[in-house]
Amino acid sequence: MENIIALAVVFLMSVVTYICGTIGEKRHYRSIREREGRLKNILVFNEKMPPAAYLKHEFTLVAGSVVMGSDYFRQVLAWLKKIFGGRLTSLESVLDRGRREAILRMKEEAARMGAKAVFNVRLETSMLAGNQTTDGRQQKLFCAEFLAYGTALYIPMNAS
């Protein structure tokens, strides 16, 4: 009887985690799409040098970073996929949201400065797979830090 209750609790936790994770992911994607629409006028390029039209502009470094974690349900799905092989699609959306969020935060910083474009944009990703002790057991965490940085070009206030 205790085993059945334990399995029911694990199943219930998985269902709740799946539902909450899906709702949170949809909410985050909605926020990302809205902010991308607002910031579409700030252009981002990976070229090192801006075109001649931007030579009158001042420049400064801008960056945006975010740490994204995965929920328990996605980790279980990824673990199962690792056993059988194949793409870890359950984690791909975490990585997609992380990259897009880091770029948006970089563009938001550029917008606060009045920048019109960001050149030499680079993305860095660091996996944070630390151990968390829960009830005396070691549990792997899936977290990743995303950093987007580049050179923001803006027109100085005293330029004529």
Image (tube, rainbow, N blue to C red):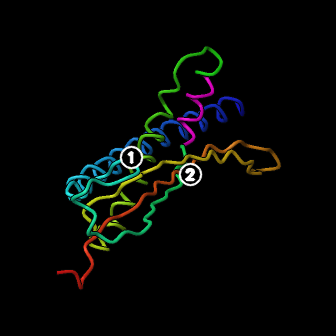
In the picture, the quarter occupied by the N terminus is top right
The residue lying toward the viewer, choosing from 108 and 20, is: 108
Give how far across and how far down residue 133 sits, in percent.
77, 51
- Residue occupying the point 53% across, 38% down: 12
> Total marks drawn?
2
- Residue occupying the point 36% across, 64% down: 152
CB under 8 Å between callouts 1 and 2? no
Give the amino acid type for the residue marked by disc 1 in the picture.
Asn
Give how far across and how far down residue 114 sits, in percent.
26, 72
* Magenta stretch bounds: 71-80
Residue 110 is left or right of residue 15, and the answer is left
At mark 1, the secondary structure is loop
Q: Mark 2, residues whose alpha carbon is within 10 Å: few (<14), some, or many (≥20)?
A: some
Q: Which mark is residue 37?
A: none
Quadrant position of residue 138: top right
Q: Is residue 41 magenta?
A: no
Give how far across and how far down residue 101 sits, in percent.
40, 53
Q: Is residue 146 above or below residue 116?
A: above
Q: Residue furthest right?
A: 136
Predominant SS of the magenta segment: helix
Q: Which mark is residue 46?
A: 1
Give how far across and how far down residue 89 sits, in percent.
47, 27
The residue lying toward the viewer, choosing from 119 and 147, is: 119
Q: Is residue 68 above or below residue 78?
A: below
At mark 2, the secondary structure is strand
Residue 155 is left or right of residue 7, and the answer is left
Quadrant position of residue 137: top right
The residue lying toward the viewer, choosing from 58 and 81, is: 58
Reading the image, the residue beneath label 2 is 145
Give the amino acid type for the residue marked by disc 2 in the picture.
Glu
How far is disc 1 from disc 2 in space, using C-alphas? Answer: 20 Å
